[in-house]
Image: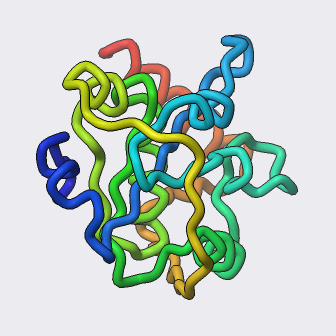
Amino acid sequence: MGLVNTDWLRKNLLSDNIKILDCSWHMPNSERSGKLEFEACHIPESIFFDIDEFSDKKSSFPHTVLPDDKFSQMISDLGISNQDHIVVYDTLGIFSSPRVWWMFNYYGHNQISILDGGLIKWCKEKKERMDFPFRSASEVTSPRQNTMILEIPQTPRSLALYCSASVLSRTGR
C-alpha cells in the first residue's frame, strides 16, 4: 500500500502493527520546526521522525542515508519492528513524508504508506489530535537496497556529463 487515506488510518489507528510517523521537516530559512509543531499537534499514536537525526552527519551532503546498522538501531529505539506497517505524514500535506517513505524502502522495509493529505487533511476532517506520545523500543533490521541509489564514478568527465544531463532533463531539452 503506497498511499492510505485518513479514514483507513482512523480505522486502523490502534492496531498493534501500525506505527505512525510524523516526518515534518521544513526548509532551514522557514523559521518552522517540525518537532515543535509535532509537540503542539499531531495524529494520535504518532512518533516524531527527525529527518536530520536520521542522516549521516559525517557526510558533506545533507540528508545522506545512514549505515544500515545505525538506521536499524535508531528505528528500533522508536519502537518500530520489521513486522510493523508504517504510515508517514507531514504537516504540509505531502512534503517531507515521501523522503521517509523512500528511506524505509531503501532499507528493505516495504510495509510503508504515505497518508494522503497529511496532517492538513486529518485536521480539516476534524479527526482526533493529541500531545506527545510514548513508545517503547523494539528490534528491527534494515538491509540496504543498493539499487535505489545511483553511484556516479568520481571523475571530472563523468561528473560533467552527469551534471549536463541533469540540467537538460530539468529544462526539458
Q: Is residue 56 above or below residue 32?
A: below
- Residue lying furthest right: 58
Labels in figure, total: 0
Q: Nearer the viewer, residue 52 or 19?
A: 19
Residue displayed at 32% across by 75% down: 17
Q: Is residue 109 left or right of residue 62?
A: left
Q: Looking at the figure, which quarter contains the N terminus? A: bottom left
Q: Is residue 1 left or right of residue 46?
A: left
Q: Is residue 110 left or right of residue 3?
A: right
Q: Looking at the figure, which quarter contains the C terminus? A: top left
Q: Is residue 6 above or below residue 148?
A: above
Q: Give percent across and percent down for residue 171.
A: 38, 13
Q: Give percent across and percent down for residue 126.
A: 24, 25
Name the image quarter holding residue 127: top left
Q: Give percent across and percent down for residue 72.
A: 61, 78
Q: Give percent across and percent down for residue 82.
A: 41, 82
Residue displayed at 64% across by 21% down: 27
Residue displayed at 61% across by 24% down: 26
Q: Is residue 164 above or below residue 5?
A: above
Residue displayed at 26% across by 70% down: 15
Q: How is the image coloured?
A: rainbow
